[in-house]
Structure formats: structure tokens, C-alpha cells
Amino acid sequence: MEVWLFRLLVVAAAALFARQMLARYRLLARAPGGFDASDLGTRIATFLSEIVFQTRTIRARPVVGIAHLLVFWGFCAFAGYTTVEALRGLGIVDLTGTAAFHAYELALVPFAIGVLGGIVLLAIRRGILRPRALGAYVSKESLLISAFIAILMITFLVDAADAHAGRAMAGVPLERVNWWAHMLVILTFTVLIPDSKHLHLLLSPATVFLRAPILGTVPKLDFEKEQTGLETVGQLEKKQVLDAFTCVECGRCQENCPAFATGKVLNPKKLILQNEEALLAGKLELPLKDLYDDPALWQCTTCGACQNECPVGVEHLPLIVNARRGLVSNGEAPAQLVPVYNHLERRGNIWGLLSEQRQKFLASAGVEIFDPAKHEYVVWLGCAGAFEADFQKSLRALFDILRAKQVRFGVLAKEKCNGDVAKRTGNEYLFQELATSNVEELNAAGVKKVITSCPHCLKTLGHDYKEFGFEAEVQHSAVFVEELTRGVTPIPGVPSQGTVTYHDPCYLGRYAKTVDEPRALLARTGATVAEPERTKENPFCCGAGGGLLFEEHEAGRRISDARYEQLAATGADTVVMACPFCSIMLKGAQASADKASADRSSADDAGAGTPGATPRGPGATPMVMTDLMSYVADRLPGVRDRGPAS
Ligand code: SF4
Ligand code: SF4
């Protein structure tokens, strides 16, 4: 009788589970695109690190991460136990009396205690502490699942203790009650999983394995196949559908998003949950622009924080860029990008300036045109290097360092914008035009090694251009100069300008994982580095990426103002930057902060209000804003030994 009842319940639970999973499988099967499993070695290493050892979860939130690790390992360890007990309940085979099972049961005890401890901690966090990232709503389902897991562990521990005592505690009735409680919870759990965030238990190994090994990988569109980007829910690709079903709603993406943090409508977590809801509701014809809050898609700086922090391999960047492509292909790019696209089309640079200005800079800097017979490296200028006076100071410093170290380098006679703005804002046609032209130029010149001081050029030339046939060693100047100046000590007597703070550009710190080299260079100059909030591989964006450099009326608070405040809060005297766009944004933020401070002072003088405080305090000396190459060139011997440039 008991056996038949259990069989009936197993069939019912399996049918309900299969029905829900089938609905999701159908959506996945009909989605366009495929899964990319290239670079297998990296994917396996990532799988071991992030699934087996949960490193990404632990790195972001150590206590929660370890609690989660205990629960995960417990689940794996209990898989065999559940199977043996189910086989017994179904009347197929009873292995519970074997010596091997008894040994296994004993080995499970520490796992059960670990899971119990972990789940209590997670439940307290979710139900009582309620961190902001989880949202205001406390999911009853997730508290119920926590209770289920606790019951599973308690019933196991009671049964193990009873078995160890030779069933002396209460004999057969206790054993049966325990067994039924345990198995009923397992069956209920099976039914609840597909429609809950706990589906990530089954899907996250796949989403983590399938995540592109390089952050920000957005494959080019194939125009011959009439690809134009994402327009409707039904066009979401297979990985995006899988991502939507895997999201665990932890809020890490939202917590780390600079747009969300500064009060914009963009919330990366919401985008993924909106995808899930629309897919399950069968709204396949719904345009994405009607699904997402307007103008969320245009508020993304492509900083990559969301995707980089997601513990289950969800990829927000390809979703956002591809959805932008869909809008641009229908002529729905925001107004501020239209002149930028025109400048890129007509003049090959984001500001629409004449190439003569680039020639003037090169002549004044005394740089030769690259000749593979004479030179080993090309220094790629980028739009900022070719036309922006401030960043040209940084390039002059780089040239001085390279000359001091007898590096044989030149520049290309012609260079167009690398196309970063076009690519990240979804103007794929324009990007491909620029990329094709630049790759032709680079390959025709015989370039094999590139140095650039722009992290966006680094990403595009070093990664995106591979799809266009450019295979060269591309390095950021911070990495190149760090290696070049190893063992060098600072010029004696040159003031270090007190404490320095370093702002990691997203495309250098997060995308390229270049965080040690800039700091090693600063240490080599004798500087003391004060780290800001959000640093190294998880910096807070300056607000310029993804085309937002051209956004004049930013909703909410300006991202650059928020970052400037974090940098000023370190109390450092100097801010060192390693990206032309970070430099433009943060210098702008400094000017706004100074103006606001001056306005507050005059209002105070006029008796019109309470004195405010600048981030560094009233009357403080303004922070020096400089770039890494200038800072280094002024302080290392043999480069500019006359001391700091005025
Ligand atoms: S890439 Fe950055 S700005 Fe864009 S959604 Fe992700 S965290 Fe937010
Ligand atoms: S997308 Fe990833 S980081 Fe964001 S809520 Fe979902 S699981 Fe968490």
C-alpha cells in the first residue's frame, strides 16, 4: 500500500515537473541562434571555479557565498542518498542495509550540518536583514524552500541518529514518519523548482559554462543573413532565453549598476526578469522597446559590472547591445548620437574634426610614420589621441618614455575611430565600415604589435577586430610601460604630490583585468595609493561608455559626479586616470563640484543658506587630476629628469 502510494506521488510530481520544464524547453528550442562552446579549456576552468567552488559568489559576498557553497555541496552529496531512498520507496531495490550505504550515511552527517547552518543564515538574511539588492518584496516561496531544505536535513539527521542507536529511539514509527516527511519534501520541491528562482540549481551549470570567456563579447552581425539585431521577445537568442530562466534574483547586477545607483530607470535585473515574464506569457511578438522601461536601453554605459558580478552567468551586455542594434536599424537612435554617427561617417572620428589636426599633433610631437623595417610597435592614437589636447599630453609622455627606453615605434599615417561608440550603441553597419577600413590599414602596414593608451581602443582592436582578420599583440600603455620600467627607482627629490588615488577605467580594470600594472607603476614613482570605494576589477564607471559621453541631459544624478565623490572621499591629493574618456568625465565632474561649492559659499556669504561641504571639505586644495603616463614620465629617471612638467 505504502509503495503504491509513493509510486503514485512520484508519477504525479514527475508529470508536473515535466509539464513546466517542457514549456521552457519549447521556448528554448524555438529561439534563434545556437550555443557557443569554443575555448573549451577556459570554459571548464570557469565551471570548476564558479560552479564547483562558487568563487564568484564568495568574492562578492563572502559570508553569503560560503553559506551558499555549503548548501550547494550538500545538494550534490545528498543526490545519492535521495536516489537510494527513492528506489527503496518505489520497491525497486533496497540498498539501505548495505555497509557501503551506512558508511555513506555517516559521511553525509557533516554535510547535513553544513547545509543546515548555511540555510539558516541565508533565511535570516532574506527574511530578517533584507538587504536592498533583494528588493522590498520578501519572496514567500524562497522562505518556504529554505524551510524545506531545513526539514530535509533535520529528518536526515534524526534518522541517522536513530539508525546509529539501532532504532532504539522510537523504532519503526519514527523511521517511517521521517522517511515520508523527507520524501514528501523532495517531491514538493521537484514540483516547485521549475517555476521558481531555484531553477538555477539545474540551469546555472549550463549558463556559466556557456557564458563568453571574454567580457563584453558581442559577435558581429551577418548582414548577408539579414541580421539586424533584436526587436521582439521572440527574437531573443537561445542563451538569452536560458539566462531569463536562470536568474536567481539576487540583485548583484542591480547593486553594481552605476545607472541604477544614480537614479536612472535602467535596472539590469529587471531586464532579465521582464524577458522571463514575457517569454512565459507567450508574448513573442512584443517589441522589446515596449517591454523595457523607456529609455533604459540608452542609459547603459556598457561598464560590464552587471554581467561580471552575476553568479549564474547571465549576460546583460549582448542583450542590451543587440536590442540597441534593433532600434538603430529602425532609425530609432537617440538624438544625441545622430551627429556622432555623422562625424564618424564623414570624418572618421567622433568629433568630426579635420585630419590636418592629427598631422599637426604628430609633427609637433616628432613621431615617425610606422615602417615595419624600422619600427617594432605602432602607437594607436584613437580619436582622443588625435584630437583632444589634454589627452595629447598623455601621449607625449608615453612617447618620451618609449624614446627614453629606445623602443622603436611609429604611428599609422591614417587612422579612423576604432568604432567603439558605433559598436556599443548598436550602429553595427557603421562599426563594420570603420573596423574593415582600420584592419585594412593595419594589415597593409604590416602591424604586429600595438600600444594604446585608450582602454576602448584596446578592447576593440585587441578583441573585436579578430572577427575582421586582425591578429596582433595589443597592449595598454600601462602594461607595456610597467614591464619596460621594472627595477627603475624614482628621481630623488621629486615631490610625490602626497597621496594618490587611481580610478580604474571599466574597459581596463574590469574588461582587461589590468589592475596591478598601473598600481605597480605608481608605487615605482614612490606614490602612496589610497583605494577608492569600488576599485580594481569592480570599479564604479565614469559614465562615458556606451555612447554616454555625448549624453548632455543625464537622468537622475550624473554618474561622473558620483564617481568623483568616491575618489574625493579617499582624501587623496591627486587622481590618476588611464583613459581619455574617464579623464573628460571626471574633470567635468570636478568642475561641477567646484562650481557647486563656490555657489554654496556665495550663498553662505549672502546669508542665504547653510554652508555645504565639498567632498574634500571647505577651503581644501583642489585635487590634481592627471593621467598615468604623465605622472610616470615626470617621476622616473631618464625620461623628463627636469622634474614634474608645469
Ligand atoms: S553594463 Fe553597467 S551600466 Fe549597463 S546595465 Fe550593466 S551595470 Fe548597468
Ligand atoms: S541577472 Fe544575475 S546578478 Fe542579476 S539578479 Fe539575476 S542572477 Fe542576480
Image (cartoon, rainbow, N blue to C red):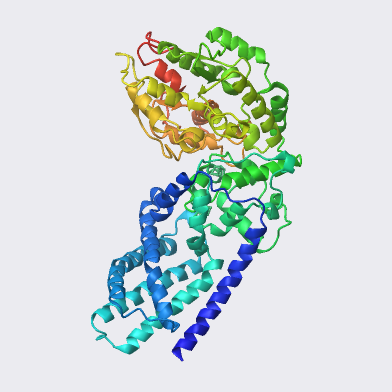
User: Quadrant of residue 481 in the image?
Assistant: top left
Image height of 444 relative to 210, above or below: above
List the single residue furthest toward the bottom. Answer: 1
Q: In which quarter of the image is residue 126?
A: bottom left
**Which residue: 49% across, 17% down?**
376
Task: Give the camera-side residue of 579 and 595.
Answer: 579
Whether residue 75 is visible to the viewer of this picture, yes or no, is: yes
Residue depicted at x 48% and y 72%: 189
Q: Residue 528: where, in percent of width, then height?
A: 33, 27
Residue 292 vertical placement versus 213 (above, below): below
Out of 512 and 462, give the one closest to the viewer: 462
Quarter occupied by the C terminus: top left
The quadrant in which residue 429 appears is: top right
The number of callouts visible is: 0
x 36%, y 56%: residue: 66
Residue 166 coordinates in the image, percent (x, y)? 24, 84
Q: Please say whether residue 336 is visible from this viewpoint.
A: no
Q: Nearer the viewer, residue 522 or 168?
A: 168
- Whether residue 408 sits left or right of residue 467 in the image: it is left
Please provide percent x and percent y for residue 109.
29, 70
- Residue at 61%, 59% (x, y): give it: 276
Residue 394 vs residue 168: left or right? Answer: right
Above or below, comparing residue 494 to residue 621 in the picture: above
Q: Position of residue 263 (x, y in %)?
A: 57, 45
